[in-house]
């Protein structure tokens, strides 16, 4: 999805029209996450996503639970999780980053609803700033929305056969 200069590109013909996107943001590392949110909002507007349900959680560790609730609601076509885990002096970083990633992956596998990992896991604030740039730069929040819409469309294309080849109810 990114070109050689690390800027997100919209896949050709991609549109969010008719989709409902869940957007979950962690409050921890608020400045960085705010920049990811701004990128996500730009992509939502560019892709003309019809509806967005937003919520906040305390930190990145809580993202999987909120994603699970949204995905299981039946009202969401895809979920984007935004957060930032910046390495510190303890092993806390490894625990939060690893479990956040594992949990988000598990939610999408369990629910068959795309859940995109817009969580920065970086060594320092400089790296976080470089991955959450303003319009025209590299922004993981923006890229996560593009990915969410693309995966929601893929899921729709395969929809009546979402579980073990059996038609989906409803």
Image (cartoon, grey):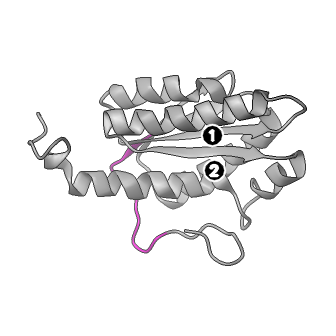
Coordinates of residue 154 in the picture (x, y in percent): 31, 57
Q: Quadrant of the C terminus?
A: top left
> Could you tell whether 122 is left or right of 67 in the image?
right
Q: Which quadrant: the N terminus?
A: bottom right
From the viewer's perspective, is residue 113 above or below residue 4? above
Dot 1: within a 10 Å radius of its alpha carbon, few (fewer than 14), some, or many (20 or more) residues?
many
Q: Secondary structure at mark 1?
A: strand
In terms of depth relative to the viewer, which is nearer, 127 or 89? 89
Q: Are marks 2 and 1 in contact (CB under 8 Å)?
A: yes
Which residue is at a point 13% across and 39% down the rendered structure image?
A: 168
- Compared to residue 5, the image places residue 72 above or below, namely above
Task: Answer with mark 2 or mark 1, whichever residue precedes in sequence.
Answer: 1
Q: Nearer the viewer, residue 1 or 30?
A: 1
Relative depth, front residue between 35 and 72? 72
Q: Which residue is mark 1?
A: 82
Q: Which mark is residue 103?
A: none
Q: Main secondary structure of the magenta part?
A: loop
Residue at image location 47% in from the left, 39% down from the top: 105
């Amino acid at each position: 999805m990114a070109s050689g200069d690390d800027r997100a590109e919209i896949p050709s013909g991609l549109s969010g029209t008719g989709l409902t996107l869940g957007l979950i943001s962690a409050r921890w590392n608020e400045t960085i996450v705010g920049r990811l949110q701004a990128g996500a909002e730009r992509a939502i507007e560019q892709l003309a996503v019809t509806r967005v349900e937003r919520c906040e959680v305390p930190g990145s560790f809580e993202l999987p639970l909120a994603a699970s609730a949204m995905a299981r609601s039946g009202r969401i076509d895809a979920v984007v999780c935004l957060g930032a885990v910046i390495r510190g002096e303890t092993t806390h970083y490894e625990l939060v980053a690893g479990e956040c990633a594992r949990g988000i992956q598990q939610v999408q596998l369990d629910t068959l609803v795309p859940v995109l990992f817009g969580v920065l896991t970086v060594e320092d604030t400089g790296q976080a700033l470089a991955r959450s740039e303003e319009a025209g730069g590299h922004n993981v929040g923006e890229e996560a929305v593009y990915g969410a819409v693309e995966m929601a469309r893929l899921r729709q294309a395969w929809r009546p056969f979402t579980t073990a080849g059996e038609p989906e109810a409803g």
